[in-house]
Image (cartoon, coloured by chain):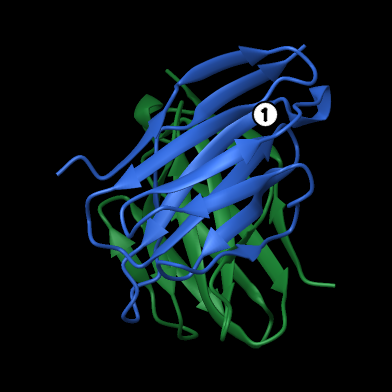
Chain colours: A green, B blue
Amino acid sequence: EDKVVQSPLSLVVHEGDTVTLNCSYEVTNFRSLLWYKQEKKAPTFLFMLTSSGIEKKSGRLSSILDKKELFSILNITATQTGDSAVYLCAVERAGANNLFFGTGTRLTVIP
Amino acid sequence: NAGVTQTPKFQVLKTGQSMTLQCAQDMNHNSMYWYRQDPGMGLRLIYYSASEGTTDKGEVPNGYNVSRLNKREFSLRLESAAPSQTSVYFCASIPGLARNEQFFGPGTRLTVL
């Protein structure tokens, strides 16, 4: 059975801290892994990862994929209160038209 | 360019009532999706449409029907609403052509009493 597991389920940090969010997966015919940020409404796209070991970076956020160990991490440095959100990991399977989502990690950044 | 739009934003139904959730995208995307999001369950795929004229079941299709009216619009219908269908519903679309990040609409919060 395909599954995507995110950890931790929730996390509370202080502004300025660095956080690492985890996503492990077991899916057939893996094609790519995607990270989304969900604040109050719709998820917004952050990264798509297809190759192992190549870091994707956008400002204070970065992510990397390990296809051998079947996981990805999302790092956020110098966290700000605006980073508070649910972070979703999703996996795309080759030949399939849909994404398979994890349950998310709820990050709360307190001033 | 409005992206993905959904109507209504909120809806309250009584058990047994029917309704249609509307979704439209103006990005010329081929594939469109309907998800539901429940606490602790993540996003679960209800139905999707890979292209105009085709629809397929996702993970949790029971109790729902869909119509891909044209390339822009993909509607989700609840024929006889049940309390178990209380959820937040998201519509999404993808550009295709090797770009598969999904663009999501703002969601519809549905409560079935």
Residue A18 seen:
no
Chain letter for mark 1, please. B
Residue A75 seen:
yes
From the top left corner, tell me how far across and down residue B11 is, in percent. Answer: 56, 16
Tell me: residue A92, above or below residue A14: below
From the top left corner, tell me how far across and down residue B20 is, in percent. Answer: 55, 32
Question: On the image, numbered disc 1 is attached to which residue?
Answer: B87
Residue A68 or B85: which is nearer the viewer? B85
Q: Is mark 1 on a helix, strand or loop?
A: strand
Q: Is residue B59 left or right of residue B49?
A: right
From the top left corner, tell me how far across and down residue A102 is, in percent. Answer: 67, 54
From this viewpoint, which residue is outermost toward the left? B1
Residue B54 or B103: which is nearer the viewer? B54
Residue B90 or B17: which is nearer the viewer? B17
Residue at image location 81% in from the left, 22% down from the top? B83
Amino acid carrying mark 1 in the image: Ser
Residue at image location 46% in from the left, 30% down from the top? A84
Tell me: residue B31, above or below residue B11: below
Q: Quadrant of the N terminus of chain B?
A: top left
From this viewpoint, which residue is outermost toward the right? A1
From the top left corner, tell me how far across and down residue B24 is, in percent. Answer: 34, 44
Q: Quadrant of residue A39?
A: top left
